[in-house]
Amino acid sequence: MNSLIVFESQYGNTERVARAIASGLGESGPVGLVAVDDAPDTLPDDVDLLVIGGPTHAFSLSRPETRASAANDGAPGTGRGVREWLHGLPTPLPVPRVVTFSTRQGHSFVSGSAAKSAAKALRAHDTVARDVEDFFVITKAGPLEDGELERAQEWGRRLGR
Ligand SMILES: Cc1cc2nc3c(=O)[nH]c(=O)nc-3n(C[C@H](O)[C@H](O)[C@H](O)COP(=O)(O)O)c2cc1C
């Protein structure tokens, strides 16, 4: 199985999760890992599984203003977000299986989830996210909660099965 992971990360935590997912998925075949700034606007036609992840900002996918706010707080950040990248993709996405993940700070459902928002954005592209998962950070800048990288690796393994 050929997988592609596209991630956005302002402070580095979502990237760490993406790398852990890649290591789990890698047991089932080749995995490409790419930051959203460098993600292709035309998806390669040999991708069996597309994994999309980003940080939860203001209950949803990041926006230019929320990324600016993170940058003001010292986050190295990215130029564009998953929201903008998704917007430019075709309808439906030319990939058999798409899943989404996010990182977030709050455990309550009112904290929102970029993974759920990405799944909603995919529906506008007539594409259904087959799996939607959240991973948790302790503060905005991280670190991740204990055990989250192991859980991400196991999620990647499961996606590959
Ligand atoms: C501007 C901003 C808004 C945020 N809003 C939320 C939120 O609504 N809910 C939440 O659970 N976490 C929120 N967070 C925490 C982020 O989810 C956290 O910074 C992110 O998971 C870290 O991932 P990263 O290191 O990949 O950027 C916010 C963070 C920032 C910078």
Image (cartoon, rainbow, N blue to C red):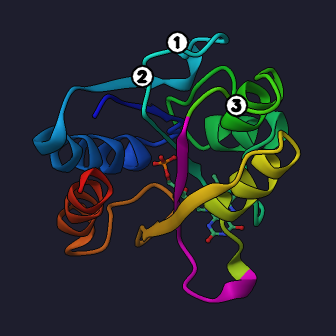
Label 1 with label 2: CB-CB less than 8 Å: yes
How far is the residue under mark 3 from the one under mark 1?
18 Å
Residue at image x 60%, y 44%? 73
Q: Quadrant of ligand 1?
A: bottom right
Q: Which of the 4 quarters of the picture holds residue 71? A: top right
Q: What amino acid is at disc 2?
A: Val
**Drawn side of residue 12 relative to residue 130, left or right:** left
Label 3 with label 1: CB-CB less than 8 Å: no
Residue 18 lies within the magenta run? no
Residue at image x 55%, y 17%? 39
Q: State the residue in front, 160 or 63.
A: 160
The disc, 3 or 2, on the residue closer to the chain's N-terminal end is: 2
Residue at which label 3 appears: 93
Residue at which label 2 appears: 34
Disc ID at residue 38: 1
Residue at image x 67%, y 35%? 82
Q: Which of the 4 quarters of the picture holds residue 12? A: top left
Mark 1: C-beta under 8 Å from nearest atom of ligand 1 = no
Q: What amino acid is at disc 1?
A: Asp
Which residue range is magenta in the image?
96-110
Residue 56 visible in the shown view:
no
Q: What amino acid is at disc 3?
A: Leu
Residue 127 is situated, as x and y percent measured from the top left of the image, at 74, 46
Quadrant of the rendering where the N terminus is positioned:
top left
Residue found at the far right of this picture: 124
Quadrant of the rendering where the C terminus is positioned:
bottom left
* Secondary structure state at the residue bearing disc 1: helix
